Amino acid sequence: MPTFAPLEGVRVLSFELAFSLPAGTRALHDLGADVVRVSPPERRHDRYISVIDGVFHGKRSMGIDLTNDRGRTLARRLALAADVVCNNFRPAVLGKYGLDEATLRQEKPELICLQLSGYGTPGPWSNYPAFGPSTEAAGGFNRLMYAEDEIPTRLNTGVFSDQLAGRHAALAIVAALQRRRETGAGAGIDLSMTACITHLLGENMTRASMLAETPAFTGNRDDRFVPQGVYRTAGDDEWIAISVTSDEAWRALCTQLNDPQLHPRLDPDADRAARLLVHDDIDRAISEWTAPQHKDEIAISLQAIGVAAAPVRTVADAGLDPQFAARGTLQAVVHDEPKMGFNSHPHPVLPWHIDGFDRRQLTDYRHTGADNRTALADWLDVSSSECDALLASSALHEEGPMSLAPRPEGPPRDPNFGDKLGLR
Amino acid sequence: MRVLQLSANTSAAYAGLLLREWGFDVDHIDVAQAFPHIDETRQAAQSVFMATTIEGAGCAVEPHDIDLRNYDAIIEDVGTDLLSQLALDWHALHKTVPQIHLVSISAFGMTGPASGWQATDLIIQAAGGVLHVSGHEDEAPRKLPGETAAMIAGVHGATAVLAAFYGQQTASDKGTNAIADSDKRNLPEGVHIDISAQDTLMHHWCRHVADYAYSGTLTERQSRDPSGIHTRHTARANDGWVFLLALGQPWQDVAAFLGLGEFLTPDVMTPAAEQPWEAMCDAYDAAVASRSRYEWFADAADLGWTFAPVEDPWSVANGPQTNARKSMHDRHFDGKPIKVPGLPARIWSDIRSGSN
């Protein structure tokens, strides 16, 4: 089958760090764009995280020293040869090197320039540093995750907000490309990670404005779906989510619960309002029923009788989910040399199925500077000897192949992960 | 580009909203919602937010009035049964108008053993996996607010519509009549894109799934009280909660910044020492509570640290950054002014002397 590559021919130059913009440009790569990421030499980075995140995969990698005159000139030439130039440095940074949107678009008005930052510009927080979880806090997400009398909680994933902002960056760039095709005009785009979070909360934000107060915390419950909850199952920290979306589904669930004599308040004919009054009792009955069973078996049996249910996937079993497997959600990325003892590892690919097309094959992480020569040759027709001179002058740099080691501190580890995932 | 939005759930409605906000024409067919809100205010809030439009763009159309030749793409989340009833299923649609694109969003996608499964947002969050790391370790995983999974799928839906159309148009411009990079097909033909909300959510915790695959690391939910000298990431300032994180910074710098100098003793700093969070937590809480969340935020930023205020919706809507960026729409509801989130991006096509 042909490969789905609607952005084939689009050149993206990305000055990127960490996860947010890399996630966005990875999405552009998945859609066929030629993405060249530029890493400055002074930037510390965690090699292990850079590799496992997967957001640098597939892209070409250049190492350019922007503090070097020849490096800056080279970066500018690349920028002017691109269709899209983007960065997620703090907003003032690229201006120091003459690579900001205003300067570049003076020379090439049809260029699309995107700046992604924690809080966006303008504003008093514009140059404050941000990390995904801090934008979740500032954007209103965390406040909706806890009750008034609780110590606030948050997501324990460092990349939720980053991925969201990356997806908005990809959307913004494709929208700007389409606009350029229609009008010939380029664009400047300023994207705020925090505002992406706030937009995700649109209904809650709007309701708060209508009520002049924060909507009450409802936890896992929803007055449309009674009962709804997350219930413990067999195994260590294993859970199942169940939502009853109709009276019919409630009656079906009641046929599965243990001895109804033990739960006299579970009336199969109770309507949603009546069930809401005894939600705690219902939760107890469901928990008793789910506790000794395997989460996948419960989900299959409940779905078979029309009850919405799904196992709560963990880091250890997400890679084994049969639906992910059937849809090819994770793709084995083959390494040139084994990494962490295995020849390949799974990474998520473009999460869309396109009838009649394959998704673009994901290739492994490229160390910084690995594509200096090919990118310069393809974009600027720079010869190999010119590259040698640029390397000699330190305008270009190359990190060299690297070995990986996990972070020394952190959560517990499962020594049998390789066998469980079938890694080779 | 003109798009027809056919939505019974949040995902296609949100995709339509994003496309309208980005300036594209989106008409919509009003389909009975699969799960309407029971609370009238929630229902109204959803309608007001989703109906936010660039002035003059988009209108409601009746199913029997659809002239498919007017559209470049359809974005839908109504499912195959209703699509077939409207003769809009992919095979019928593609036969009738070969150049139109169809982007379908569903909980689990249109293929695979779970493709027919029933779902709400909680179910997708569970199956997508992010739910497992949400909340505290001593309680059940906690649902992410709102219809997070559906809306993330909506961002993908909007991108898919634009990407498919852009690829088709540029292929046509080039005269290749193809949007594939090989095996050129007779185009411009449309494509059918099947988006699974479960699949899209996987990307939002992919670091942790990969961390397990590379090293067996088991990421779990937060503990309520930290161990060792690690501190709570959220503590109460004198005007609300503040998120505190100084990534990669040594404890002594953080302790000095917070005014916890009394804990900078050899006993505490020796790696082998039994670290005294229990002894320190009261002093920690008192230190954080001595200043406002905005003071902590600003002073930490000066050091390059990523503290942040834990904002409630009102604070977000009326905060200095939001106001400076004009990122909320001013609307009216029941005669009262309200604020509704606008696009998280500012875009301009003119060439300016400085964007900041």
Image (cartoon, coloured by chain):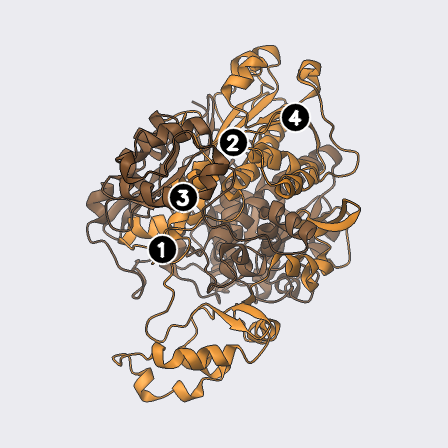
Chain colours: A brown, B orange
Q: Which residue position is annotated with label 4?
A: B30
> Are tags 2 and 3 found on a single chain?
yes
Are the residues at dot 4 and dot 2 in contact (C-beta closer than 8 Å)? no
Q: Examine the rendered structure and indicate whether residue A154 appears above or below residue B126.
A: below
> Are tags 2 and 1 found on a single chain?
no
Are the residues at dot 4 and dot 3 in contact (C-beta closer than 8 Å)? no
- Mark 4 falls within which chain? B
Q: Between disc 4 and disc 1, whose residue precedes?
A: 4
Using a 10 Å C-alpha cutoff, classify the residue at mark 3 as few (fewer than 14 neighbours), some (14 to 19) or many (20 or more): many
Are the residues at dot 4 and dot 1 in contact (C-beta closer than 8 Å)? no
Using a 10 Å C-alpha cutoff, classify the residue at mark 4 as few (fewer than 14 neighbours), some (14 to 19) or many (20 or more): some
Residue A300: quadrant of the picture:
top left
What is the number of the mark on residue A5?
Answer: 2
Q: Examine the rendered structure and indicate whether residue B89 appears above or below residue A52.
A: above
**Which amino acid type is marked by label 1?**
Glu
In terms of depth relative to the viewer, which is nearer, A343 or A134? A134
Q: Examine the rendered structure and indicate whether residue B337 appears above or below residue B297.
A: above
**Label 1 residue SS:** loop
Image mark count: 4
> Are tags 4 and 2 found on a single chain?
no
**Label 2 residue SS:** loop
In terms of depth relative to the viewer, which is nearer, A392 or A338? A338
User: Where does residue B165 sit, x and y in percent of width and height?
Assistant: 62, 28
Q: Between disc 2 and disc 3, whose residue precedes?
A: 2
Q: Is residue B302 visible?
A: yes
- Mark 1 falls within which chain? B
Q: CA distance from mark 2 to mark 3?
A: 41 Å
**Which amino acid type is marked by label 2?**
Ala
User: Where does residue A389 sit, x and y in percent of width and height?
Assistant: 50, 59
